[in-house]
Amino acid sequence: MNRSTLDKLVSSTGLIVAIVLLAGSSALFYAHHFVHTQVYNQLSAEKIMFPPRDSAGLTALPAADRTAMEKYAGQQLTTGAQAETFADHFIAVHLQKVGDGKTYSELSAASIANPTDTKLMAQVNTVFKGETLRGLLLNAYAFDTMAMVANCAAWGALVAGAVLLVLAVLGFMHAGMVAKPKAPRKR
């Protein structure tokens, strides 16, 4: 196999990989946009607001949770990062107080064992709703994180595809230069 044929073969492979990477890049950009927009629209529709900076809802929190929440004080919850903060530093803290540190399953088991305890039933109901909301918010955070990963992968695929495209073109140009045999020298 001569050098020109090898260059054409390698360049053709590079061109095919470049096309696949560029197509994958556009699909990943679409995925990022779609998921991120869905998370934003769904969270915005809920109209969840972070408590204002000096409100009792924030000042009653432990210092680490208050610090995390103050970053978004007074804002509407619309992003995955905000959803994680609200779920882990607001809802989770309040649920610990409602159930005296017990989980939903622990409270539920206690309520089943003592069906006449209305206070315990109310705690079970509140913790169930709170954990459900917390889980939904953490799912929004997870999906928004996947959207960000798709965005990073899209940029990586775009750059890699562009570099391979340039290298493939250069390879074809080189194959054209090598293909022209030089005339033998006369002695």
Image: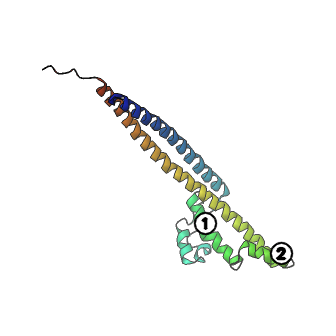
Write down the quadrant of residue 165 in the picture. Answer: top left
Q: Closer to the camera: disc 1 or disc 2? A: 2
State which quadrant residue 107 falls in: bottom right
Q: Secondary structure at mark 1?
A: helix
Q: Judge by depth and name the residue closer to the eye, 65 or 3.
A: 3
Q: What residue sits right under mark 2 in the picture?
A: 112
In the rendered view, does 109 fall on the left or right side of 92? right
Residue type at mark 1 is Phe
Vertical position of residue 40 compared to residue 117: above or below: above
Calculate the distance from the C-alpha at mark 1 to the C-alpha at mark 2: 30 Å
Dot 2, crowdedness within 10 Å: few (<14), some or many (≥20)?
few
Q: Where residue 154 sits: x, y (%)?
A: 49, 46
* Pointers 1 and 2 in contact (C-beta within 8 Å): no
Q: Does label 1 or label 2 sit earlier along the sequence?
A: 1
Instruction: Locate residue 79, reporting x and y percent.
Output: 57, 57
User: Image quadrant for the N terminus?
Assistant: top left
The amino acid on which the numbered mark 2 sits, given as a three-letter code, is: Ile
Numbered tag placed on residue 19 in the rendering: none
The image quarter containing residue 106 is bottom right
Q: Which residue is mark 1?
A: 86
Identify the image's colour scheme: rainbow, by chain, secondary structure or one colour. Answer: rainbow
* SS state under label 2: helix
